[in-house]
Amino acid sequence: MRTGLRYLSLAHRVRRIVDDQMVVGGLSLARVKILRIIDEQGPQRQVSLADSLGQAPRSVTQAVEALEREGLVSRTVDPHDQRAKLVALTPAGVERLAAGVAAGEQALHQIFGPLGPVRLARLGKLLDMVDDAVATDP
């Protein structure tokens, strides 16, 4: 129990550090996730984006609207369904995504790099075990 609580606390701190570093790079972790999905999967409907993120469609709509105001994504009518809109990255979105990812990777390297390859491999195996336990939890 104590180790689990410590893990939760540490995960929260690491996430905050990475997010703060990404914001300095121009994007929050949440926005990087949205842009990364669009970058990897191509233009898509907002509802599909919400499903990929495991979020409510309204939350994603608000985030997409903000990203559109900043010129990082564009929304166009879906040619297969005139009622739906497709969200795509703009060239500025591609650039900002690259900067955000680089900032996040730098933060993670600063945090985990000192562990070295052997300890990182061990940590990876332990995290796999935790992930498996969570996946089998009813």
Image (cartoon, rainbow, N blue to C red):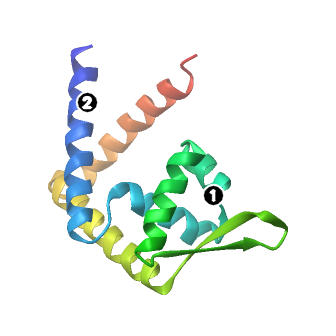
Q: Position of residue 115 (x, y in %)?
A: 18, 51
Q: Position of residue 64 (x, y in %)?
A: 51, 62
Decide if residue 31 is on the left or right side of residue 90: left
Q: Residues within 10 Å of mark 2 (few under 14, many from 20)?
A: few
In the current view of this chain or complex, which residue is farthest to the top?
1
Number of numbered callouts drawn: 2
Q: Residue 7 bears which disc, if any?
A: 2
Q: Are marks 1 and 2 in contact (CB under 8 Å)?
A: no
Decide if residue 107 is on the left or right side of residue 132: left
Q: Is residue 128 above or below residue 59?
A: above
Q: Could you tell me if residue 97 is visible in this image? A: yes
Identify the secondary structure beneath mark 1: helix
Decide if residue 135 is on the left or right side of residue 25: right
Q: Position of residue 126 (x, y in %)?
A: 36, 34
Query: Of circles 1 and 2, which is in front?
Result: 1
Q: Position of residue 44 (x, y in %)?
A: 67, 65
Amino acid carrying label 1: it is Gln
Label 1, label 2: how far apart the Cα atoms are: 33 Å
Q: Could you tell me if residue 119 is visible in this image? A: no
Q: Nearer the viewer, residue 62 or 89?
A: 62
* Residue found at x 37% / y 77%: 96
* Residue found at x 40% / y 73%: 97
Decide if residue 128 is on the left or right side of residue 2: right
Identify the secondary structure beneath mark 2: helix
Q: Is residue 72 above or below residue 132?
A: below
